[in-house]
Amino acid sequence: MSYFASIFKDFEKIKWYSLTIIIVLIFISIFLYLAQKRQKFSTKALVYGGVVIALSFILSFIKLYRMPQGGSITPASMLPLFAYAYIFGPFAGIVAGMAYGILQLIQDPYVVHWAQLLLDYPLAFGALGFAGFLRKNLPLGILIGGFVRFAFHFISGVVFFASYAPKGTSPVVYSAIYNATYLGPDLAVCLIIAFIPGLRSAIDRLKSQT
């Protein structure tokens, strides 16, 4: 019996957040498996997906401002994911966003609970793919995707970071202000760049070729 227990002894060394990451990856795999009959990724979608995730990840390392409890303002690190969802649709965009969220978790984790991890990483960044529901209007898609991401962070803030609210301040108000402080400017940068005629034409050209 002791030998049998020793075989699995190393499982005790697994941290709860590592186990949560494994569960998230399994969840994404099941999601892809169940959805593959409805929409299959083309080679082009897979290649572009890898490129935009890498580009967003690189841009996320450039932090113009970092918030104390997580979150930062970057030079439009969300824009490649918005553009990807705009070109290939919401399903592809959500999957790419969730994958990017896992990378964000590995890069700069701020975790206090497994449910907060889900809300602030795979779900929040997967929400950027909602931009794909408005494939005829990229700026409006950016606003929708950004708002849904804000909603996940907002819920996380109210539930898990209420103790950080200043005395006398409602956790709801605190979470709304905190998340709007960095997401607002980050989203504004994405919108400004999206209105650049040359870039917009390039994105529309790529969309017409898919």
Image (cartoon, helix red, strand yellow):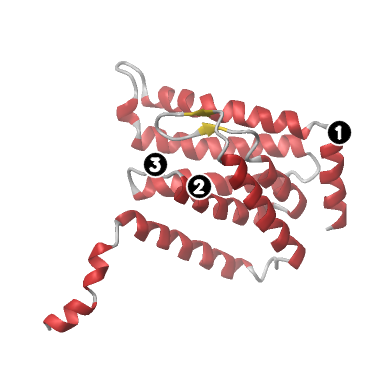
Q: Along the polypeptide, which appears first: circle 2 or circle 3?
A: 2
Residue that appears at 47% across and 37% down? 153
What's the CA distance linking mark 1 and mark 3?
Answer: 37 Å
Q: Which residue is mark 2?
A: 104
Q: Position of residue 52 (x, y in %)?
A: 68, 51
Residue that appears at 45% across and 43% down? 108
Q: Amino acid at mark 2?
A: Gln
Q: Which residue is mark 3?
A: 110
Q: Amino acid at mark 1?
A: Pro
Q: Amino acid at mark 3?
A: Tyr
Q: Position of residue 68 (x, y in %)?
A: 40, 29
Residue that appears at 35% across and 18% down? 169
Q: Tag 3's secondary structure?
A: loop
Q: Position of residue 62 (x, y in %)?
A: 58, 36
What's the CA distance linking mark 2 and mark 3?
Answer: 10 Å
Q: Is residue 153 left or right of residue 18?
A: right
